[in-house]
Amino acid sequence: MRTKPVPLLAAADRRPSGPTVKSWEIGPATYQGQQVKPKVVQDCGWGRLIFAHTFPGAEEVASTLLKERPGQRDIAFYLRDPHVLLSIHPHKLFLDPSHTFRLWLTEYPSDPNRTPGFKITTIQSEADILSLNRIYTARGMVTVDPDFLKKHRRSRKILYLLAKDQATHEVIGVIMGVNHRLTFNDPEKGSSIWSLAVDPQTSHPGVGEALVRQVAKRMKARGCSYLDLSVLHDNHEAIALYQKLGFDRIPVFAVKLRNTINERLFSGPSPDQRLNPYATIIVNEARRRGIDVDVLDAEAGYFRLTFGGRAITCRESLSEFTTAIAMSRCADKTLTRRLLKDAGLSVPAQVVAQGGKSNRDFLRRCKSIVVKPATGEQGKGVSVDVHTVKAMESAIAHAGKFGDQVILEQYVKGEDLRIVLINYEVVAAAIRRPARITGTGRHTIAELIERQSQRRARMTGGESRIPMDSETKRCVKESGYQLTDWLPKGKSLTIRKTANLHTGGTIHDVTEKIHPGLISAAIVGAKALAIPVVGFDFIVPTISKSDYVIIEANERPGLANHEPQPTAERFIDLLFPQTKTPTHSM
């Protein structure tokens, strides 16, 4: 016998101050005489949103979840008794470890502030679709079927919004909203937010907040009374934002299917959870192929891969396949330059820092130079675009802290291009840009740097931070500012000259766009160093031409920085070619 329907919110709780909630019971198709569409499943492009409270029973919700399509992620939401649903298939389903928050729209004011430097818009082109999926890939989220977006981009039931940089027109954020009233004639006129993601490379603050506010504004205009969202319990930054915007926690739960996409949510912490992103991406690909992984030193990124009686020890992308000779050629920057020059490749002028007159003469000839330790990595001790004797002397002293020998190198203006080769083939190329901040009109430059550094650290697993060192202070001063100055709203400021990821730089994939001459030069360079895995740092006037200089070679390039390129797949192909499948063939 059908039970009397219980509304999602009790009447006494329908006010902005009331965070308590009663969920509907699973079963009713009517509410206070209003017909409610039964068994509602809304396709969202990345998976299906299953409105569990519109189903006649838990068994049908479970069977619907079990029909999840490969490569997608379904979510059963608004469950009154999730434990009952889990009891039906305890080994196939799990309770999502997320909190649900609700924002009442009836008294929610429209945001009076304009977003500085970016705008919110709907999907306009196929390029927009590629860009939003690039962001989802970079954040480890399920991508959206492009054909679905083309078909539904003007839908009134679901709403995809993009944040676009006003100067470059690049997509820097994406969000999806669902209108429950139009989806299943929801008598409570609800709505919800899903798949919020911000480009980890953007320097604009407040992108996620602006997207949430815009969805709230639009759902309110369409007659919705509240806006719900689900967020992982340990995403403290996002929770703080939602609470700031007026969202309150409510006791609503979600159940998902156990699959490889959701594995980290139900399998618990892995024994190698301390591995950095560069080792993790390789380890995950190895395990996916059935290769045994033994973590030797998680903190340093050492692990051993074993398959078919063959064992190979790696430190991130550095493996036993790279000889000590090849590694030493990359470690010594003067030797690297000499070998590349002998191979007919273009390299900048370079000298070892000596006495005062010798250094000044080199600076006078080049007009502007790069000062860096002869050995080292991750941009430590590097100063770029040094053009005064005083700055040069300070930079030499700074570089000396990271190595016994310091190099002075001709500064070549242009874009910083990283090209990664595996097995002497180019697998990824990306433009690297120095750390930048964007003014809010309310924060000092020092505060903006700290906030941007925290964002970069969160988005890269702690690998990217902006050091508040003499180089950062020099760049800010040369731009005409002091760290204590307030940066005008919307004003963008480059705060480092180096584009290294570890010092706050960002990386932007251009693999399909680089000139064939750059690809040829990279292959010649890898063969000259006799190194099977390498990342070359090029300076180019533009990626569409063959002009370049090579300034450095990295024997342990970070493979996690090049989404969506299959860097980890190609690395495992090199180590264990017998595990290659047609999907991973060159």
Image (cartoon, grey):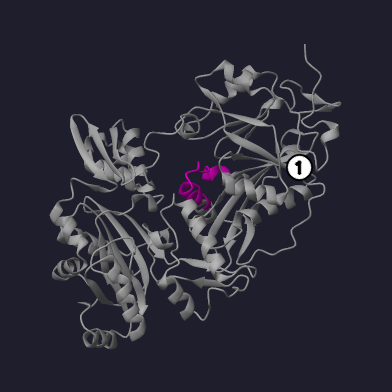
Residue toward you, 366 or 406? 406
Q: Is residue 402 left or right of residue 128?
A: left
Q: Is residue 16 left or right of residue 66?
A: right
Would you call the spot at circle 1 few (<14 residues within 10 Å), some (14-19), or many (20 or more)? many
Residue 147 is one of the magenta-drawn residues: yes
Q: Residue furthest top?
A: 1
Q: Which quadrant of the structure image shows residue 376?
A: bottom left
Q: Is residue 261 left or right of residue 535?
A: right
Residue type, label 1:
Tyr
Residue toward you, 304 or 347? 304
Residue 427 picture location, percent across and down:
30, 52
Q: Which residues are magenta?
A: 132-148
The reply to whether residue 586 is visible in this rendering is no
Residue for point 25% across, 66% down: 403
Decide: is 566 above or below 164. Answer: above
Q: For the residue labelled by badge 1, is the local secondary structure a helix, a strand or a loop?
A: strand
Residue for point 52% across, 45% down: 146
Residue 137 picture location, percent across and down:
47, 47
Residue 188 picture location, percent across and down:
80, 35
Residue 543 is one of the magenta-drawn residues: no
Decide: is 364 above or below 40. Answer: below
Residue toward you, 335 or 157? 335
Tag 1 residue: 226
The reply to whether residue 349 is visible in this rendering is yes
Decide: is 293 above or below 26. Answer: below
